Image (tube, grey):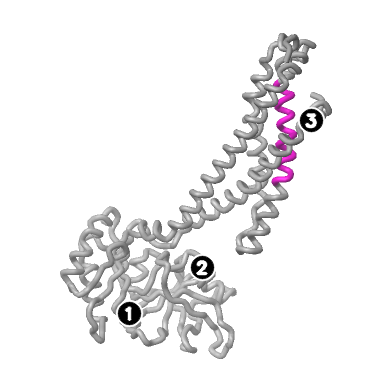
Amino acid sequence: MQIKPILSALRRHKSGTILIALQIALTLAIVCNALFIVHERVDKVNRTTGLDETNLIAVSNDYVGAPEDFTPIMKTDLQTLRSLPGVVDAYVTNSYPLRQGGWSTGVQTDPDSTKQGISTALYFGDEHALKTLGVRLIAGRNFNAGEVVTVGRQQQPGTAQVIVTKALADKVFPDGNALGKVIYLAKGKPSTIIGIIEKLTTPWIQNDFVEGDYVTIMPVMFNSSFQQFLIRTQPGQQDAVFKAVPPALYASNRMRVLPEKVGIRKFEDVRRRAYDADRGMAILMSVVCGVLLAITAAGIVGLSSFWVGQRRKQIGVRRALGARRSDILSYFMTENFLIALVGVVVGVILAVGLSQWMFTHFEMKRLSLTYVAIGVVALLALGQAAVFAPALRASRVSPVEATRSV
Protein backbone atom coordinates (compact mmCIF):
# COMPACT_ATOMS: atom_id res chain seq x y z
CA MET A 1 0.00 0.00 0.00
CA GLN A 2 1.49 3.35 -1.09
CA ILE A 3 1.20 6.13 1.46
CA LYS A 4 1.44 9.00 -1.03
CA PRO A 5 -2.06 8.54 -2.58
CA ILE A 6 -3.53 8.37 0.92
CA LEU A 7 -1.82 11.61 2.00
CA SER A 8 -2.98 13.25 -1.20
CA ALA A 9 -6.58 12.23 -0.44
CA LEU A 10 -6.33 13.46 3.15
CA ARG A 11 -5.14 16.87 1.96
CA ARG A 12 -8.38 17.18 0.03
CA HIS A 13 -10.33 16.48 3.24
CA LYS A 14 -8.41 18.66 5.69
CA SER A 15 -11.32 19.66 7.91
CA GLY A 16 -12.50 16.16 8.67
CA THR A 17 -8.96 14.86 9.08
CA ILE A 18 -7.98 17.60 11.53
CA LEU A 19 -11.18 17.26 13.56
CA ILE A 20 -10.82 13.51 14.01
CA ALA A 21 -7.11 13.83 14.85
CA LEU A 22 -7.88 16.50 17.47
CA GLN A 23 -10.70 14.41 18.89
CA ILE A 24 -8.34 11.46 19.28
CA ALA A 25 -5.70 13.73 20.85
CA LEU A 26 -8.10 15.22 23.40
CA THR A 27 -9.54 11.80 24.21
CA LEU A 28 -6.05 10.38 24.81
CA ALA A 29 -5.04 13.30 27.03
CA ILE A 30 -8.18 13.14 29.15
CA VAL A 31 -8.51 9.35 29.32
CA CYS A 32 -4.87 8.78 30.33
CA ASN A 33 -5.07 11.26 33.20
CA ALA A 34 -8.56 10.11 34.20
CA LEU A 35 -7.56 6.45 34.35
CA PHE A 36 -4.45 7.38 36.34
CA ILE A 37 -6.70 9.16 38.85
CA VAL A 38 -9.07 6.18 38.91
CA HIS A 39 -6.16 3.83 39.64
CA GLU A 40 -4.97 6.08 42.47
CA ARG A 41 -8.46 6.22 43.97
CA VAL A 42 -8.92 2.46 43.75
CA ASP A 43 -5.56 1.91 45.43
CA LYS A 44 -6.58 4.36 48.12
CA VAL A 45 -9.95 2.69 48.72
CA ASN A 46 -8.26 -0.71 48.99
CA ARG A 47 -5.57 0.52 51.38
CA THR A 48 -5.25 -1.80 54.37
CA THR A 49 -5.55 -0.43 57.90
CA GLY A 50 -3.79 -3.18 59.83
CA LEU A 51 -7.03 -4.01 61.67
CA ASP A 52 -9.11 -7.17 61.81
CA GLU A 53 -11.80 -5.32 59.85
CA THR A 54 -14.00 -8.34 59.21
CA ASN A 55 -14.82 -8.77 62.89
CA LEU A 56 -14.71 -5.18 64.13
CA ILE A 57 -17.60 -3.02 65.35
CA ALA A 58 -17.31 0.71 66.16
CA VAL A 59 -19.61 2.47 68.63
CA SER A 60 -19.87 6.25 68.99
CA ASN A 61 -21.30 7.00 72.42
CA ASP A 62 -22.32 10.34 73.91
CA TYR A 63 -23.14 10.32 77.61
CA VAL A 64 -26.00 12.55 78.74
CA GLY A 65 -25.65 14.51 81.97
CA ALA A 66 -22.67 16.18 83.57
CA PRO A 67 -20.91 13.95 86.08
CA GLU A 68 -17.45 15.10 87.08
CA ASP A 69 -15.95 11.72 86.27
CA PHE A 70 -17.11 9.51 83.37
CA THR A 71 -14.49 6.85 84.12
CA PRO A 72 -16.71 4.56 86.26
CA ILE A 73 -19.42 4.60 83.58
CA MET A 74 -16.90 3.76 80.85
CA LYS A 75 -15.47 0.87 82.88
CA THR A 76 -18.97 -0.50 83.45
CA ASP A 77 -19.71 -0.23 79.71
CA LEU A 78 -16.50 -2.07 78.90
CA GLN A 79 -17.40 -4.89 81.27
CA THR A 80 -20.84 -5.07 79.64
CA LEU A 81 -19.41 -5.24 76.13
CA ARG A 82 -16.72 -7.77 76.98
CA SER A 83 -19.28 -10.07 78.59
CA LEU A 84 -21.50 -10.24 75.50
CA PRO A 85 -21.58 -13.65 73.76
CA GLY A 86 -19.37 -13.66 70.67
CA VAL A 87 -17.14 -10.77 71.82
CA VAL A 88 -13.38 -11.37 71.82
CA ASP A 89 -12.45 -8.06 73.43
CA ALA A 90 -13.32 -4.36 73.58
CA TYR A 91 -11.76 -1.06 74.61
CA VAL A 92 -12.53 2.65 74.63
CA THR A 93 -10.57 5.20 72.61
CA ASN A 94 -10.61 8.70 71.21
CA SER A 95 -10.32 7.60 67.57
CA TYR A 96 -9.43 4.79 65.17
CA PRO A 97 -8.44 4.30 61.51
CA LEU A 98 -10.76 5.80 58.87
CA ARG A 99 -12.84 7.66 61.47
CA GLN A 100 -11.88 10.98 59.82
CA GLY A 101 -11.30 12.72 63.12
CA GLY A 102 -8.76 12.49 65.90
CA TRP A 103 -5.72 13.91 67.63
CA SER A 104 -2.19 14.46 66.41
CA THR A 105 1.04 15.85 67.83
CA GLY A 106 4.74 16.09 67.06
CA VAL A 107 7.38 13.52 68.01
CA GLN A 108 10.74 14.77 69.25
CA THR A 109 13.86 12.97 70.38
CA ASP A 110 15.27 16.14 71.91
CA PRO A 111 13.10 17.90 74.55
CA ASP A 112 14.83 21.22 73.87
CA SER A 113 14.34 21.13 70.12
CA THR A 114 12.46 24.05 68.58
CA LYS A 115 11.44 22.05 65.52
CA GLN A 116 7.88 20.81 65.12
CA GLY A 117 8.97 17.19 64.91
CA ILE A 118 7.42 14.29 63.03
CA SER A 119 3.62 14.38 63.18
CA THR A 120 1.88 11.33 64.60
CA ALA A 121 -1.74 10.39 65.18
CA LEU A 122 -2.61 9.73 68.83
CA TYR A 123 -4.82 6.80 69.79
CA PHE A 124 -5.85 6.19 73.40
CA GLY A 125 -6.19 2.64 74.63
CA ASP A 126 -5.45 0.14 77.38
CA GLU A 127 -4.10 -3.40 77.68
CA HIS A 128 -7.06 -4.64 75.61
CA ALA A 129 -6.43 -2.34 72.62
CA LEU A 130 -4.04 -4.49 70.60
CA LYS A 131 -6.13 -7.64 70.94
CA THR A 132 -9.29 -5.74 70.00
CA LEU A 133 -7.73 -4.16 66.93
CA GLY A 134 -6.16 -7.42 65.82
CA VAL A 135 -2.81 -5.72 65.11
CA ARG A 136 0.47 -7.63 65.31
CA LEU A 137 3.03 -6.71 67.96
CA ILE A 138 6.42 -7.28 66.29
CA ALA A 139 8.66 -6.04 69.11
CA GLY A 140 8.40 -5.29 72.80
CA ARG A 141 5.31 -5.78 74.94
CA ASN A 142 1.74 -4.65 75.47
CA PHE A 143 0.51 -2.22 78.13
CA ASN A 144 -0.47 -3.54 81.54
CA ALA A 145 -3.44 -2.34 83.60
CA GLY A 146 -1.23 -0.37 86.01
CA GLU A 147 0.10 1.82 83.19
CA VAL A 148 -3.30 3.12 82.09
CA VAL A 149 -3.95 6.70 83.27
CA THR A 150 -7.06 8.89 83.20
CA VAL A 151 -6.73 12.20 81.37
CA GLY A 152 -9.24 15.04 81.74
CA ARG A 153 -10.65 17.18 78.98
CA GLN A 154 -8.41 20.11 79.85
CA GLN A 155 -5.24 18.06 80.21
CA GLN A 156 -2.53 17.43 77.65
CA PRO A 157 -2.06 13.65 77.34
CA GLY A 158 1.40 12.40 78.16
CA THR A 159 2.30 8.93 79.40
CA ALA A 160 5.49 7.19 80.49
CA GLN A 161 4.95 4.34 78.03
CA VAL A 162 3.79 4.31 74.41
CA ILE A 163 3.42 1.81 71.58
CA VAL A 164 4.19 3.01 68.05
CA THR A 165 3.86 1.69 64.52
CA LYS A 166 6.88 0.34 62.68
CA ALA A 167 6.55 3.18 60.16
CA LEU A 168 6.90 5.80 62.90
CA ALA A 169 9.68 3.89 64.68
CA ASP A 170 11.72 3.67 61.47
CA LYS A 171 11.12 7.35 60.73
CA VAL A 172 12.16 8.62 64.17
CA PHE A 173 14.97 6.09 64.62
CA PRO A 174 16.31 5.15 61.17
CA ASP A 175 18.96 2.90 62.72
CA GLY A 176 16.16 0.47 63.67
CA ASN A 177 16.71 0.59 67.43
CA ALA A 178 13.49 2.32 68.50
CA LEU A 179 12.44 -0.17 71.18
CA GLY A 180 13.26 1.17 74.63
CA LYS A 181 14.10 4.63 73.29
CA VAL A 182 12.62 7.81 74.77
CA ILE A 183 10.54 10.23 72.73
CA TYR A 184 8.80 13.47 73.68
CA LEU A 185 5.17 14.01 72.73
CA ALA A 186 3.62 16.52 75.10
CA LYS A 187 5.39 19.58 76.43
CA GLY A 188 8.66 17.78 76.91
CA LYS A 189 7.22 14.81 78.83
CA PRO A 190 9.35 11.71 78.15
CA SER A 191 7.68 8.53 76.87
CA THR A 192 9.45 5.22 76.44
CA ILE A 193 8.63 3.06 73.43
CA ILE A 194 7.72 -0.29 74.99
CA GLY A 195 6.19 -1.90 71.89
CA ILE A 196 6.17 -1.70 68.10
CA ILE A 197 3.22 -2.87 66.00
CA GLU A 198 3.45 -3.87 62.36
CA LYS A 199 0.82 -1.55 60.87
CA LEU A 200 -1.94 0.83 61.90
CA THR A 201 -3.20 3.70 59.78
CA THR A 202 -4.20 7.20 60.83
CA PRO A 203 -7.83 8.38 61.17
CA TRP A 204 -7.51 10.61 58.10
CA ILE A 205 -7.60 9.14 54.62
CA GLN A 206 -6.11 12.28 53.05
CA ASN A 207 -3.11 12.35 55.41
CA ASP A 208 -3.38 16.14 55.60
CA PHE A 209 -2.48 16.03 59.28
CA VAL A 210 -0.05 13.13 59.43
CA GLU A 211 2.15 11.75 56.66
CA GLY A 212 2.29 7.97 56.37
CA ASP A 213 1.16 5.41 58.94
CA TYR A 214 2.70 7.32 61.83
CA VAL A 215 0.63 6.29 64.85
CA THR A 216 1.26 6.36 68.61
CA ILE A 217 -0.92 4.49 71.11
CA MET A 218 -1.05 5.88 74.66
CA PRO A 219 -2.34 3.97 77.72
CA VAL A 220 -5.02 6.58 78.37
CA MET A 221 -8.68 6.58 79.38
CA PHE A 222 -10.05 9.94 78.29
CA ASN A 223 -12.48 11.43 80.79
CA SER A 224 -15.07 12.89 78.42
CA SER A 225 -18.77 12.53 77.65
CA PHE A 226 -18.04 11.49 74.04
CA GLN A 227 -16.28 8.17 73.52
CA GLN A 228 -15.49 5.61 70.85
CA PHE A 229 -15.82 1.93 71.74
CA LEU A 230 -14.25 -0.69 69.50
CA ILE A 231 -15.42 -4.31 69.74
CA ARG A 232 -13.81 -7.33 68.16
CA THR A 233 -16.09 -10.30 67.63
CA GLN A 234 -15.45 -13.95 67.04
CA PRO A 235 -15.55 -14.98 63.36
CA GLY A 236 -19.15 -15.25 62.18
CA GLN A 237 -20.56 -13.49 65.25
CA GLN A 238 -20.44 -9.89 64.03
CA ASP A 239 -24.14 -9.67 63.11
CA ALA A 240 -25.31 -11.13 66.42
CA VAL A 241 -23.06 -8.83 68.46
CA PHE A 242 -24.07 -5.85 66.32
CA LYS A 243 -27.71 -6.39 67.29
CA ALA A 244 -26.91 -7.05 70.95
CA VAL A 245 -24.75 -3.98 71.64
CA PRO A 246 -27.40 -1.18 71.77
CA PRO A 247 -29.80 -2.92 74.18
CA ALA A 248 -26.89 -4.02 76.35
CA LEU A 249 -25.50 -0.49 76.64
CA TYR A 250 -28.91 1.07 77.31
CA ALA A 251 -29.57 -1.59 79.95
CA SER A 252 -26.27 -0.68 81.61
CA ASN A 253 -26.98 3.06 81.58
CA ARG A 254 -29.77 4.82 79.67
CA MET A 255 -28.12 8.23 80.08
CA ARG A 256 -26.49 8.10 76.68
CA VAL A 257 -27.08 8.82 72.99
CA LEU A 258 -26.06 6.52 70.16
CA PRO A 259 -26.34 8.65 66.99
CA GLU A 260 -28.65 7.11 64.41
CA LYS A 261 -26.21 6.82 61.48
CA VAL A 262 -22.85 6.52 63.21
CA GLY A 263 -23.80 5.28 66.66
CA ILE A 264 -22.96 1.67 65.91
CA ARG A 265 -21.32 0.52 62.70
CA LYS A 266 -19.61 -2.52 61.32
CA PHE A 267 -16.16 -1.57 60.16
CA GLU A 268 -17.11 -2.24 56.55
CA ASP A 269 -19.59 0.65 56.94
CA VAL A 270 -16.85 2.84 58.42
CA ARG A 271 -14.65 2.10 55.41
CA ARG A 272 -17.47 2.68 52.92
CA ARG A 273 -18.38 6.03 54.48
CA ALA A 274 -14.74 7.16 54.61
CA TYR A 275 -14.14 6.41 50.94
CA ASP A 276 -17.52 7.45 49.49
CA ALA A 277 -16.01 10.49 47.75
CA ASP A 278 -13.07 8.54 46.31
CA ARG A 279 -15.32 5.73 45.12
CA GLY A 280 -17.68 8.25 43.52
CA MET A 281 -14.79 10.01 41.80
CA ALA A 282 -13.47 6.71 40.43
CA ILE A 283 -16.91 5.83 39.05
CA LEU A 284 -17.39 9.29 37.54
CA MET A 285 -13.97 9.24 35.88
CA SER A 286 -14.61 5.75 34.52
CA VAL A 287 -17.92 6.87 33.02
CA VAL A 288 -16.26 9.93 31.48
CA CYS A 289 -13.59 7.71 29.92
CA GLY A 290 -16.21 5.36 28.53
CA VAL A 291 -18.26 8.21 27.07
CA LEU A 292 -15.21 9.86 25.48
CA LEU A 293 -14.07 6.60 23.90
CA ALA A 294 -17.57 5.94 22.59
CA ILE A 295 -17.83 9.43 21.11
CA THR A 296 -14.41 9.10 19.49
CA ALA A 297 -15.31 5.73 18.00
CA ALA A 298 -18.62 7.13 16.74
CA GLY A 299 -16.79 10.07 15.17
CA ILE A 300 -14.40 7.78 13.32
CA VAL A 301 -17.26 5.58 12.11
CA GLY A 302 -19.27 8.60 10.98
CA LEU A 303 -16.42 10.26 9.11
CA SER A 304 -15.30 7.00 7.48
CA SER A 305 -18.86 6.22 6.39
CA PHE A 306 -19.19 9.71 4.93
CA TRP A 307 -15.95 9.33 2.99
CA VAL A 308 -16.99 5.92 1.68
CA GLY A 309 -20.26 7.42 0.45
CA GLN A 310 -18.40 10.23 -1.28
CA ARG A 311 -15.87 7.93 -2.95
CA ARG A 312 -18.09 5.16 -4.21
CA LYS A 313 -17.38 6.02 -7.84
CA GLN A 314 -13.62 6.26 -7.24
CA ILE A 315 -13.72 2.93 -5.41
CA GLY A 316 -15.65 1.42 -8.31
CA VAL A 317 -13.00 2.71 -10.75
CA ARG A 318 -10.22 1.12 -8.71
CA ARG A 319 -12.17 -2.13 -8.57
CA ALA A 320 -12.69 -2.02 -12.34
CA LEU A 321 -8.95 -1.48 -12.83
CA GLY A 322 -8.21 -4.65 -10.88
CA ALA A 323 -8.04 -3.61 -7.23
CA ARG A 324 -9.01 -6.44 -4.90
CA ARG A 325 -11.45 -6.08 -2.04
CA SER A 326 -8.53 -6.55 0.35
CA ASP A 327 -6.77 -3.58 -1.31
CA ILE A 328 -9.76 -1.31 -0.67
CA LEU A 329 -10.05 -2.53 2.91
CA SER A 330 -6.35 -1.97 3.48
CA TYR A 331 -6.56 1.53 1.98
CA PHE A 332 -9.19 2.76 4.42
CA MET A 333 -7.59 1.00 7.39
CA THR A 334 -4.23 2.61 6.59
CA GLU A 335 -5.79 6.00 6.02
CA ASN A 336 -7.48 5.90 9.41
CA PHE A 337 -4.31 4.61 11.09
CA LEU A 338 -2.36 7.62 9.82
CA ILE A 339 -5.00 10.00 11.15
CA ALA A 340 -5.05 8.21 14.51
CA LEU A 341 -1.24 8.21 14.63
CA VAL A 342 -1.13 11.99 14.27
CA GLY A 343 -3.84 12.26 16.90
CA VAL A 344 -2.02 10.11 19.48
CA VAL A 345 1.25 12.00 18.93
CA VAL A 346 -0.50 15.27 19.72
CA GLY A 347 -2.41 13.52 22.50
CA VAL A 348 0.78 12.37 24.22
CA ILE A 349 1.98 15.97 24.36
CA LEU A 350 -1.39 17.12 25.71
CA ALA A 351 -1.55 14.28 28.27
CA VAL A 352 1.89 15.07 29.71
CA GLY A 353 1.11 18.79 29.72
CA LEU A 354 -2.21 18.26 31.50
CA SER A 355 -0.52 16.04 34.06
CA GLN A 356 2.14 18.67 34.73
CA TRP A 357 -0.52 21.34 35.13
CA MET A 358 -2.44 19.23 37.68
CA PHE A 359 0.83 18.44 39.47
CA THR A 360 1.64 22.14 39.75
CA HIS A 361 -1.80 23.42 40.76
CA PHE A 362 -3.33 20.50 42.69
CA GLU A 363 -0.23 18.69 44.05
CA MET A 364 -1.25 15.49 42.25
CA LYS A 365 1.22 12.82 41.23
CA ARG A 366 2.71 13.00 37.76
CA LEU A 367 1.16 10.79 35.13
CA SER A 368 2.94 7.47 34.71
CA LEU A 369 4.21 6.92 31.17
CA THR A 370 2.77 3.43 31.38
CA TYR A 371 -0.71 4.94 31.17
CA VAL A 372 0.35 7.02 28.16
CA ALA A 373 1.65 3.91 26.38
CA ILE A 374 -1.51 1.96 27.19
CA GLY A 375 -3.61 4.91 26.03
CA VAL A 376 -1.74 5.13 22.71
CA VAL A 377 -2.23 1.43 22.02
CA ALA A 378 -5.89 1.57 23.09
CA LEU A 379 -6.71 4.59 20.88
CA LEU A 380 -4.96 3.12 17.86
CA ALA A 381 -6.80 -0.17 18.36
CA LEU A 382 -10.09 1.64 18.90
CA GLY A 383 -9.56 3.62 15.68
CA GLN A 384 -8.90 0.50 13.67
CA ALA A 385 -11.88 -1.30 15.17
CA ALA A 386 -14.16 1.69 14.52
CA VAL A 387 -13.14 2.05 10.87
CA PHE A 388 -13.35 -1.67 10.07
CA ALA A 389 -17.09 -1.74 9.31
CA PRO A 390 -17.06 1.28 6.94
CA ALA A 391 -13.86 -0.04 5.30
CA LEU A 392 -15.45 -3.46 4.84
CA ARG A 393 -18.49 -1.80 3.28
CA ALA A 394 -16.20 0.10 0.93
CA SER A 395 -14.46 -3.10 -0.12
CA ARG A 396 -17.82 -4.49 -1.22
CA VAL A 397 -18.47 -1.67 -3.68
CA SER A 398 -19.02 -3.21 -7.13
CA PRO A 399 -16.92 -2.22 -10.19
CA VAL A 400 -20.23 -1.29 -11.78
CA GLU A 401 -20.21 1.90 -9.66
CA ALA A 402 -17.55 3.25 -12.05
CA THR A 403 -20.10 3.39 -14.86
CA ARG A 404 -22.79 5.16 -12.88
CA SER A 405 -23.24 8.90 -13.16
CA VAL A 406 -23.19 10.98 -10.01
| Residue 352 or residue 239, whichever sits in front | 352
Identify the residue at horizontal 54%, vertical 83% (top origin): 108
Residue at x 80%, y 31% (from the top left corner): 7
**Residue 340 pos. (x, y %):** 70, 36
- The structure residue drawn at horizontal position 46% and vertical position 85%, both measured from the top left corner, is 186
Give me the C-alpha separation between circle 1 and circle 2: 25 Å
Q: Earlier in the sequence, mark 1 or mark 2?
A: 2
Magenta-highlighted residues: 329-347
Residue 159 appearing in the image: no
Of residues 231 and 21, the one drawn nearer to the viewer in this rendering: 21
**Picture coordinates of residue 332, whole percent (x, y):** 71, 25
Residue highlighted by disc 3: 12
Q: Is residue 202 left or right of residue 170?
A: left
| Residue tagged 2 | 207
Quarter of the image where the N terminus is located: top right
In the rendered view, tell whether residue 199 sits above or below residue 193. Answer: above
Q: Is residue 403 magenta?
A: no
User: Residue type at mark 2?
Assistant: Asn
Q: What is the chief secondary structure element of the magenta stretch?
A: helix
Q: Which mark is on residue 122?
A: none
Disc nearer the start of the sequence (1/3): 3
Q: Position of residue 239 (x, y in %)?
A: 26, 55
Check disc 3 and give the amino acid type: Arg
Name which of mark 3 and mark 2 comes first in the sequence. 3
Helix, strand or loop at disc 1?
Answer: strand
The alpha-carbon separation of the residues under discs 3 and 2 comes to: 56 Å
Report the disc number at residue 221.
Answer: 1
